[in-house]
Amino acid sequence: MPVSSKGAKRTPFCQYGGPLRELPASHAFAAAAKDAINSAKVDPTLIDETVVGNVNYLSQCDGGKTPRYCGLYSGVPIEKPALGVSKACGTGLQAIITAAVDILFGTSKITLTGGTDIMSTLPMLVRNVRFGTTLGTAHVFEDHIQRELVDSYSGKTLSEIVEELARRFKIGRKETAADGAAALLLASAESVKTHNLSPLVKITGWSCVGVAPEDSGIAAAVAINETSAAQVLASAKELKVDLSKVNVNGGALAVGHPVSATGARMVTNLVYELRVIEEAY
């Protein structure tokens, strides 16, 4: 598959309510993207498009335009388009896949991709006031992060789904929210040759499958995402993998889980881990 990663960088993943809480998600992405572009020695005017994962777009003033501004603040020419991607915890991975597909189809030769989320600035919710209310009615501020709504398909909250998963596999659970971004540059084989670029890794393929909503915690990649401890342990048991080889540099429980950025962070980590392994052998 003639798609390569030229640069891969990320910001620190900071705790919920921590030092990144006032930073717009597009600025966090741009910080990582500029570093990725510089390390790849790519002229940003050569970038054909921006594909960025951003689930919690209500957490910043730019809203749904966040992916567009991720590109502009990173130095991508204003006439180049941008696309926002949302796929829950797999958002950052899906952004990379979508970018690779565009390169394979020839609609882009060099694409800036990744994910970004500043979960600390998600607004509080107040329900049943949009169309009026009555005097004396009490209205409670609802925390989108802390209060989980019931899934319309399974009739359970995410926590209940994970608890059930933990009981089934006899394991514990833990989860964490965070703020951060990760950015990667993808390029076609033609661009690598034309611009004398040095690939970090090559993308050789991918696979996406669906599971029942109540089994959504069992979702695996080369590195296993850790929205909760139960998920990674259940995935490892189901796949019969050696835990000593899983998330060797820490997963989302160790570094934080900004939903839109985690998948891109996983790939960024794998890019450099694969190079370390290659040098070792």
Image: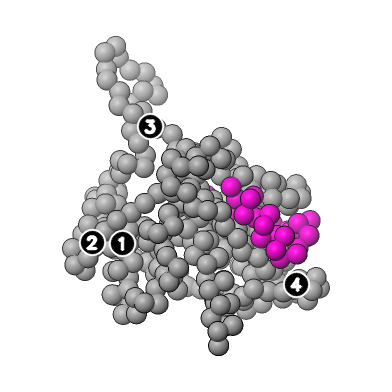
What's the distance in space between the residues labelled 1 and 3, CA to CA? 28 Å
Image coordinates of residue 211 in percent, x first then y, are 34, 65
Marks 2,1: beta carbons within 8 A: yes
**Which residues fall within the magenta stretch?**
28-54
Residue 212 in the figure: left or right of residue 105:
left
Check residue 229 in the rendering and tell me which mark sits there, or answer none. 1
Would you say residue 154 is visible in this rendering?
no
Amino acid at pointer 3: Leu
Residue 227 in the figure: left or right of residue 160:
right
What residue is at 70 percent from the left and 60 percent from the top? 37
Find disc 4 in the rendering and name its residue: 197
Image coordinates of residue 276 in percent, x first then y, are 56, 77
Find disc 3 in the rendering and name its residue: 125
Image coordinates of residue 120 in percent, x first then y, are 45, 40
The tag earlier along the polypeptide, 1 or 4, is 4
Amino acid at pointer 1: Ala
Marks 1,4: beta carbons within 8 A: no
Q: Residues within 10 Å of mark 1 (few under 14, many from 20)?
A: many
What's the distance in space between the residues labelled 3 and 4, CA to CA? 48 Å
Check residue 172 in the rendering and tell me which mark sits there, or answer none. 2
Q: Is mark 2 on a helix, strand or loop?
A: loop
What's the distance in space between the residues labelled 4 and 2, CA to CA? 45 Å
Image coordinates of residue 213 in percent, x first then y, are 31, 59
